[in-house]
Image: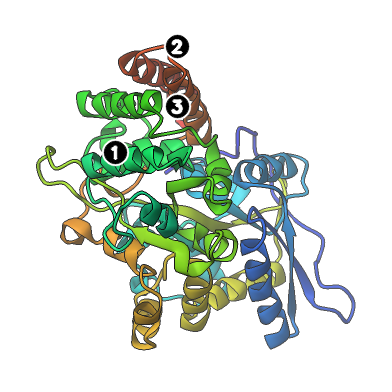
């Protein structure tokens, strides 16, 4: 694979200035996109690594949400001031894999430093997302999640619904949302990350193609296929629910998280990684937070299939187009990645946050501890990833599209216009495909060689 450098020509590479201060540890700059409380939990992991050894010091820095962190890292690379490590959300994977000398692939990093990580222990859905077809790892998986359904048990009780029997199908969800609205709740159902939850996850769960070439895993020549008849019907359903008041738009990207955390929304589709916030902030506390798998439509043969992962991975970056890291810096990055891969860290991150236990050993350790028995619903994301027997198809492996951050914005814009009554579901998805394909072709031209 020929990889470009974030759109920049790459001249000869030179070593960066030594990072080892006289008598001090090698400093490793780490930019992340997790706000509190998740950001604090992540920074505690870096502090633990710093305390366990004295040769390297990880310096974490919150750079805004995922999209802002991505833009900042690309700008810093072009200026020759990129961080050693950047946290990049999963939709940026296609861009990072083709970023050429901007990144240091994990498989190269480990080979050159002699540091070992057992990627065979990683969950297949997680490993496959950040690796090449031959299995070589490009990014370092960490805070992987999937979208699930959270619901407010008190709102269910007020509506006469059983808080221990959440809706399993879309028909049941609509009926529950209508009853919740009738009980006086103004926002029965909403969604965070609306394209991820309502288009990308719906497509995977129903084995529908989001794009050709196995959602982009097969190469750069992909085209969007989200305007298929079944997805059109699903968007039309959301539009009907919006008109009747059983569904309300919660905002773009992660904005919807707040409407459930505050108690405004009774049901939300959101990242499993939002669990920590919800347990802390939802009125009534943890006892009032229910969790269930995303609903499915039984009219689709074979449904439900597995959901797909989200979250983010860590990417090792070179400083700039003409400056790579020295051996000490690379060793520090590799050892920090190995720390993240440890069973103890992976297990604790999962139990503290709701993100997935990315390794099999971490999952087994958590299960053996009795955590899932004591915290009902905490294993919902894992069960959902294994729906359909855990056999992934070309439509359920994930999504690897160049420029996907921009494509998501386009899909959100078209969804908004449809929900505002400005266009039909069919027009919205056709427009998303037309506009999104322009992004794909621009990315293809910039990265083919």
Report the mark closest to the observer, 3 or 1: 1
Where is residue 174 shown, x and y percent of the image?
29, 38
Q: Residue at x 47, y 18 (%)?
A: 420
The residue shown at (49%, 62%) is 275
User: Which one is in front in this view, the residue at disc 2 or the one at disc 1?
Assistant: 1
First along the sequence among labels 2 and 1 = 1
Q: Which mark is residue 279?
A: none
Disc nearer the start of the sequence (3/1): 1
Q: Does the image show residue 378?
A: yes
The residue drawn where x is 37% and y is 53% is 156
Residue under numbered circle 3? 411
**Pointer 2 residue:** 422
Q: Nearer the viewer, residue 9 or 355?
A: 355
| Callouts 2 and 1 close, C-beta under 8 Å | no
Q: What is the spatial separation of the Cα atoms under label 2 and label 1, in whole angstroms?
A: 23 Å
| Residue 46 versus residue 231 in the image, above or below | below
- Of badges 2 and 3, nearer the viewer stands 2
Residue most toward the right? 22
Helix, strand or loop at mark 3 = helix
Does 259 sit left or right of 428 as displayed? right
Q: Residue furthest left?
A: 301
Residues packed near mark 2 inside 10 Å, few (<14), some (14 to 19) or many (20 plus) = few
Report, in whole angstroms, how far the alpha carbon at label 3 lies from the one at label 1.
Answer: 23 Å
**First in sequence: mark 2 vs mark 3:** 3
Q: Is residue 280 left or right of residue 146?
A: right
Q: Characterize the local packing of mark 3: few (<14), some (14-19) or many (20 or more) Cα atoms within 10 angstroms.
A: many
Q: Which residue position is annotated with label 1?
A: 174
Q: Relative to 126, is 182 above or below? A: above
Q: Nearer the viewer, residue 100 or 148?
A: 148
Instruction: Classify mark 1: helix, strand or loop.
Output: helix
Question: Is 293 positioned to the left or the right of 108 in the image?
Answer: left
């Amino acid at each position: 694979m020929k990889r470009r450098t974030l759109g920049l020509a790459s001249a000869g590479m030179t070593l960066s200035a030594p990072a080892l201060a006289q008598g001090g540890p090698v400093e490793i700059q780490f930019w992340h996109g997790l706000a509190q409380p998740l950001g604090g939990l992540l920074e505690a992991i870096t502090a633990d690594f710093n305390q366990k050894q004295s040769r390297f010091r990880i310096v974490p820095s919150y750079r805004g949400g995922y999209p802002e962190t991505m833009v900042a890292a690309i700008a810093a690379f072009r200026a020759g001031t990129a961080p050693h490590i950047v946290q990049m959300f999963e939709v940026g994977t296609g861009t990072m894999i083709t970023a050429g000398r901007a990144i240091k692939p994990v498989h190269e990093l480990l080979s050159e430093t002699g540091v070992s990580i057992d990627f065979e222990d990683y969950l297949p859905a997680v490993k496959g997302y950040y690796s090449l077809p031959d299995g070589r790892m490009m990014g370092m998986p960490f805070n992987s999640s999937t979208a699930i359904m959270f619901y407010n048990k008190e709102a269910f009780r007020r509506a006469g619904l059983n808080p221990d029997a959440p809706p399993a199908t879309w028909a049941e969800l609509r009926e529950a949302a209508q009853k919740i609205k009738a009980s006086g709740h103004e926002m029965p159902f909403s969604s965070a990350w609306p394209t991820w939850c309502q288009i990308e996850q719906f497509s995977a769960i129903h084995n529908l193609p989001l794009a050709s070439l196995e959602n982009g895993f097969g190469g750069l020549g992909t085209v969007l296929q989200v305007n298929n008849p079944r997805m059109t019907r699903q968007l039309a359903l959301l539009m009907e629910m919006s008109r009747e008041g059983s569904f309300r738009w919660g905002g773009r990207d992660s904005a919807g998280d707040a409407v459930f955390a505050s108690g405004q929304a009774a049901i939300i589709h959101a990242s499993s990684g939002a669990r920590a916030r919800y347990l802390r902030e939802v009125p009534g506390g943890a006892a009032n937070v229910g969790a269930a798998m995303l609903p499915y439509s039984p009219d689709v043969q074979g449904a439900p299939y597995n959901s797909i992962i989200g979250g983010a991975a860590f990417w090792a970056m070179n400083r700039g187009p003409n400056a790579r890291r020295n051996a000490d810096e690379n060793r520090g990055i590799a050892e920090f990645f190995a720390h993240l891969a440890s069973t103890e860290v992976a297990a604790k991150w999962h139990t503290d946050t709701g993100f997935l236990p990315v390794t099999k050993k971490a999952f087994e350790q958590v299960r053996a501890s009795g955590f899932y028995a004591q915290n009902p619903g905490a294993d919902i994301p894992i069960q959902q990833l294994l729906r359909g027997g855990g056999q992934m198809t070309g439509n359920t492996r994930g999504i690897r599209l160049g420029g996907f951050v921009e494509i998501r914005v386009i899909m959100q814009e078209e969804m908004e216009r449809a929900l505002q009554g400005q266009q039909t579901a069919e027009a919205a998805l056709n427009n998303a495909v037309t506009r999104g394909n322009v992004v794909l072709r621009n990315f293809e031209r910039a990265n083919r060689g």
